Image (cartoon, rainbow, N blue to C red):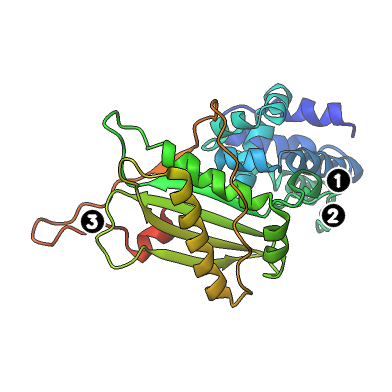
Amino acid sequence: MDEQTFWDLVDRLGHDPADFDRLADELSDHGAADIRDFADHLARALHALDTPAHYRAVATSGASFLGVRCAAVAAGATAYRRVLSAPSALASYAHRPGSQLLPVAERAFRTSTRGDWQHRTAVSTRTGSNVAAWGDSWLHPQMGTTTTTAEGRAPQDYMVALRHVALTLDGDPTWRSWWRQSGLSACELGIVAEGKLDHLRPSADIRRCGDSLRANFTCALPTEGMDLSALAAAEVRAMFEVIRQAMSMPGLPPTPPVPTLPADVPEVPVTTKPLPELPAELEPQGYLTLAQIQEFFG
């Protein structure tokens, strides 16, 4: 099966979940070699969307990155090529069905051959497996807040500053070398800015997830007149000091000079969730608990 035939089959999918069943039935009319080729073409299409830019486009959606990539492929060749060249477009597929595409080849193979599916695709679909795209990227920041502006929008200036610091550390050779000592491939750093921190210390949740570390922190929003870049650098470094201690790693490298933000820096995607409302007889909570920070980014 060539690539064009693969896309001809996929392009017949619509918005009905039953279309995936019909695709599996149609594919089962092909021989075993064609079915394995279909699986390989799908894996290569998903692998090509496994890039930091595509990952960041859906990082705050709470959806599975692999599932969203599947949805973009299931949308057909034209939609897929648009997403491939414009990563931000992937966000529009965050809540569309697509993961049903993954088992189609196996189902077709079992129907066609009555045998067991033991095929390994030519490339992996696992997040981060596209080494050429990810390169040495190890730090993946996600931004969140429990407050909004008067216009109902997430505060951007501080979110931009925090993310800018994180991306500076990601690109610094000394910090990359330091992180390699963790033995993990990546750090998913979630930062939630709370309007008021009236508890003793910010909430922090640090967990290993596969070969990555997921570390979610809260921090206070700055007051008027504060140097946002300096504050952001201090906050992010303090977060990594907590991570360092939790993982028993060597001391942190010096924080590199943070480049000045460009004037046309785009808005940063921010997950916004209000603080939970408590019954009137209870004292207002006013801050995120550990369980809430664990679930903030999904």
Q: Residues within 10 Å of mark 3 (few under 14, many from 20)?
A: some
Which residue does the numbered mark 1 point to in the structure image? 36
Q: Residue at x 81, y 56 (%)?
A: 117
Q: Do the residues labelled 1 and 2 touch (CB within 8 Å)?
A: yes
Front of the two marks 2 and 3: 3
Q: Which residue lies furthest to the bottom in this view?
A: 248
Q: Distance between the residues labelled 2 and 3?
A: 53 Å
Front of the two marks 1 and 3: 3
User: From what the image shows, is residue 180 above or below residue 109?
Assistant: below
Label 3 sits on a secondary structure element that is loop
Instruction: Tell which of 285 and 245 is nearer to you.
Output: 245
Q: How many marks?
A: 3
Label 1 sits on a secondary structure element that is helix
Which numbered circle lies on residue 5?
A: none
Which residue does the numbered mark 3 point to in the structure image? 286
Quadrant of residue 254 within the rendered picture:
bottom right
Q: Residue at x 34, y 45 (%)?
A: 273
Q: Which residue is drawn at 47% across and 49% down?
A: 230
Which residue does the numbered mark 2 point to in the structure image? 119
Of labels 2 and 3, earlier in sequence is 2
Label 2 sits on a secondary structure element that is loop
Q: Quadrant of the N terminus?
A: top right
User: From what the image shows, is residue 182 above or below residue 146?
Assistant: below
- Is there any visible trace of residue 61 in the rendered image? no
